[in-house]
Each structure stands twice: as C-alpha cells, then as structure tokens.
Image (cartoon, rainbow, N blue to C red):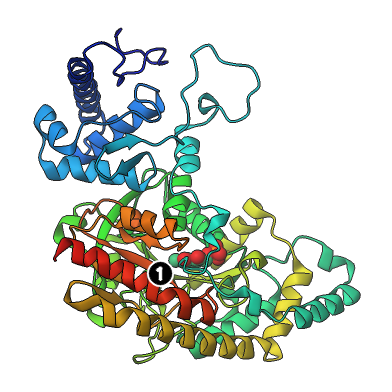
Amino acid sequence: MGAICSNREVPLLTTPSANPLLLLLENFRMLSELLLTEMARLSQKDNMPLHRQLYEALRRAMLDGKLGAGDRLPSSRELTDDLKLSRNTVVAALNQLSVEGYLVSRVGSGTFVNDNIPKAQPRTRPSSAPHHVADLSRRGTALSSTFCATRLEIQPFTPGIADFSAFPVALWQRLQNKHWRMTYPEMLDYSYSGGYAPLRRAVADYLRVFRSVPLDVDQVIITSGTQQSLELCAHMLADHGDTVWLEDPAYWGAVKAFMATGLQAHPVKVDQHGMAPSPADEKKPPRLIYTTPSHQYPTGAVMSLARRQQILSIARTHNAWILEDDYDSEFRFSGPPLSSLAGLDKDERVLYLGSFSKVLYPGLKLGYLVVPKRLEAAFKQAHYDLNRPGQMPLQAALAEFIELGHFASALRRARSSYAQRRQCLLEALQPCLGEHAQITGAEQGLHLCVRLPQAVDDQALVQRMADMRLTVRALSAYCLERTDAKGLVIGYGYAPLTEIQRYGPILAQAIKAEIRRLAP
Ligand SMILES: Cc1ncc(COP(=O)(O)O)c(C=O)c1O
C-alpha cells in the first residue's frame, strides 16, 4: 500500500495481499495515524470536544476518499485502544456518523462506510458533472448526504405522516375554483407582506382560542411551512457560527435548517419532561433554542411546567430566542389540554411555529410563524425579500376553508380517526412489552415511541422489520450525540385501521422477540 493519498487511487482500508490479517492491521494503524493527525489539527484550530474531533476526522477521511464505500472500520474497542480515547468518546463519534448515514453496522460483521456517501473526485477538476462533491461546499455535502428523506417515507407506520387521503378534495376544489374565478390582478402578484390578511386573521383567531397564544394579527406571517419559518428565524436572529440548542433526539428537518444557515448545533438531552438542559449545557450559551414542547419529536415527551419555566429563564439569562415548533398539538387524545410555551412567555422571547401539513396535507406547503411585536416589521420585510412569497388564491381558499368551519370539521374527523388507530396500536403493543419496554408519547400526535433497553440494536431491529415490509424508525437514528436512547418510533396517522389491526400484532411480536433475545 502506498502513502495515504487525498484522491484515493489506493484505498486506505483494503486487504488485497497474501496475508490479509497483517495488511489489515497495517491499514488500521495508518488510519489511526491519519485520525490522530487530523484531530490534533482540529483541536488547535477549533477547540472542539474530543468526540467531535474524532467525528470530523473520520467524516473528512470519508469525504476525501481516504476511507471508501464499503470499507470496514476497526471496532470501537480497537479505536479506543489505538487512539487512547475513552470508549464513550469513540462510541459517540461512531454513533453520530451512523445516524448521519456515513456508517452502517452489519450485525456480526462490523461497521462499514456506507455505499451512498459522495465519492471523492480527482483533484484535476472534471468539466461539467453537476453533482460532484468537488462542486459542493462542505455545507452542501453535509446537506445532501445526511438524514436524507425518501419518498418511501409514506408507509403505514412511518412516523409523522398524516392521513391526507381523508382530505375533502372535492370541497377544496370548489373553493379553489371560486377563488380563481374571483381573482383580480393583484391576487396574481407576490403575496402581501406577511401573507393574505384574512388567512392571517383566521390563524390568529385559531391560536388565541385553541393554543392560548396571546397575539394580534400583525404578528402572524404566512410561510411555506415550518422549514421556511425555521430558516427565516435563523437568518434573522442568529449569525453564522452562533449556537442553537437542539433537542437530542431531534427533528431532522430542524437539524437541516440550522445546518443550512451555518449555526452550531448544541444537542441538549431530552428526558421524560422534555428538553432537559444541564449546567454543562449552559457553558455553551444558546442564541436560539429550538424545541417541540407539546409533544417532543420523536420521543413524544410533554414538557413539564417546571421545564417550561426553566427554558424561559435560560432564554432570559442568555438573551436567547425560543423557537416553539407546535407541529401536532391539534391531536391531543388524553391528559389535560396543554397550553403553548408562547402562552407563558412574558418577555416576548418565543417565536411560535405552526404548519398545515398535518391537519390538511403536506403538499399544501403553508404554515405560519408568530413573531413578537418588536420583530414584526423586520421579519415581514426579510421574508418578502428572501422568498418573494406568492400563492394568494391558495391562501384565500384556505382562509375561507377555515372561516366556513371546514377546518374545524376536518380536524374533528381526523382526531376521531387517529384516536381509533392509536387505540388499536396500543392494544396490539401493550400486552407484548412487559417491563423492559415502555410506550411514551401516545397522548398526542400521529406517532408514539416504544423505548427499549440500551442493549438493543434498534437500527438492526428496524432493518429486520423492514424485511417484513414494516417501516418504522429507530429512535437512535434521531440522536445527535447521545448513545443511550434506543427504541422504535411508530406512526399511526397514515395507517388505515385495518392495517393496524393486521400488522400491529406482528410489530408487537417482533419487539417481544427482540426483548426476549436480550433478557431470556
Ligand atoms: C417536528 C416537526 N415539525 C414540523 C413539521 C412540519 O413541517 P412542514 O411545515 O415544513 O411540512 C414536521 C413534519 O413532519 C415535524 O415532524
């Protein structure tokens, strides 16, 4: 094997010779040297924690092609010994790379570089290929290779998907036609600053009554959904490199929005009461705090009142902003009604984000952002300039849909149908779980979480379920840094009742078998 080369004519980890074991050991030694050199460079430059240095060093080795698709990595124990690091440090780095899709684990054979990571290109730049990694910024590479959603998401048990087949299409079409018939030229222009006024009014009325958000209509900005709201908040309230606190485990959409806007993510553990900042977290003071307090995504934890007060107080201390993503609070099935964090906010530090993706349908691409009064003018101006928003006839149809009470009836119908599905799933799961597994987050929303013992390889379990054509997600796949959260995130919004009746028991049996395997 030649020296380590940046454009990887010779892969770093291969075993092509007569004595594969010796070569393997030699390869691993070279990898360790490479990692240590890169970590030393990173520690001088950026003062990163060790697990982050190792994560970066491995990630760069993969992106530069020094580690290639399909290469096997040394085990965490081997890396621990070779690099003289603690096991936790190594496991945290490897776990993060798995979560982001750089590494895959194959039970019994080890950890490998994913086949799908972008391939390194030769230094001599090829002419016109559009998606070469050399063409992308580091941010572009990260955005296009981590947490990638696929259309396969639309499967019965995929979390986060609503049953948009129940949407009243004929009625919607009539309303749309009516607004297209009535359309006057201004309606074909970019939308008014902040959005179409009757829609903003309808949203404000709804939030005042049902979410206890104290607001007036001027504070509402119609956006193309939560992603756009998040990016707008990040652009307007934080500068490149500022810290955003994210829940760990986290909503991928938010992770990507902050990655795209150049913020430094700081993961804060979630416990049964929601986001749980510790004094150590406060050493990394936030500029933004992104949270899903009504139904933490994905664990489903409901943020306690004490925790809400704590988050508000931290924001006050650090002069930070809170971004409250209230993505599925319309569907609450048990427990007392919850008011929003924005409703408790006395200092105007909470920005409230909502979406029509769950109640109506995701392709509608309409959501809303409620900003404190003092930010209103600046946000509207920037939203207009950055996005040139439009779709006024669509916004007008939606405003009328809400005003005429169709939104409330769609919500009522959806609530009762999801309540049945949820109940059916709970009845299938509960008898099989015993003391080693526990359901969380079933009081609200379109998914629940089955927490499993730490020893469970939840990603392997998800793969086994996929082999049975059941799509669920591994809780660990949402984790940013922590390695102790294992479980399954199971959606019931999209699954018809008959499918839950049929496949719920199969899911439950697969979980039971896994638990038995660990604790016979
Ligand atoms: C936590 C969370 N927030 C927000 C959304 C809605 O996002 P959008 O309005 O961009 O469709 C989702 C959708 O899955 C979600 O899971």
- What type is the residue that disc 1 sits on? Ile
Give the quadrant of residue 397. Answer: bottom right
Side of 231 where 349 appears, left or right = left
284 vs 47: above or below = below
Q: Quadrant of the C terminus?
A: bottom left
The residue at the point 47 percent across, 87 percent down is: 419
The residue at the point 39 percent across, 43 percent down is: 101
- Residue 490 x/y as whole percent: 40, 69
- Residue 321 x/y as whole percent: 38, 63
Give the quadrant of residue 168. Answer: bottom right
Give the mark count: 1
Side of 355 where 323 appears, left or right = left
Residue 350 in sight = no
Viewer-closest of 336 and 78: 78
Disc 1, SS:
strand
Residue 173 in sight = yes
- Residue 24 x/y as whole percent: 22, 20
- Residue 265 x/y as whole percent: 34, 50
25 vs 174: above or below = above
Side of 28 where 261 appears, left or right = right
Q: Quadrant of the N terminus?
A: top left
440 vs 76: above or below = below
The residue at the point 34 percent across, 42 percent down is: 104
Residue carrying label 1: 490
Side of 84 where 405 appears, left or right = right
The residue at the point 37 percent across, 39 percent down is: 102
Viewer-closest of 120 and 503: 503
Viewer-closest of 48 and 116: 116
486 vs 441: above or below = above
Residue furthest top in the image: 2
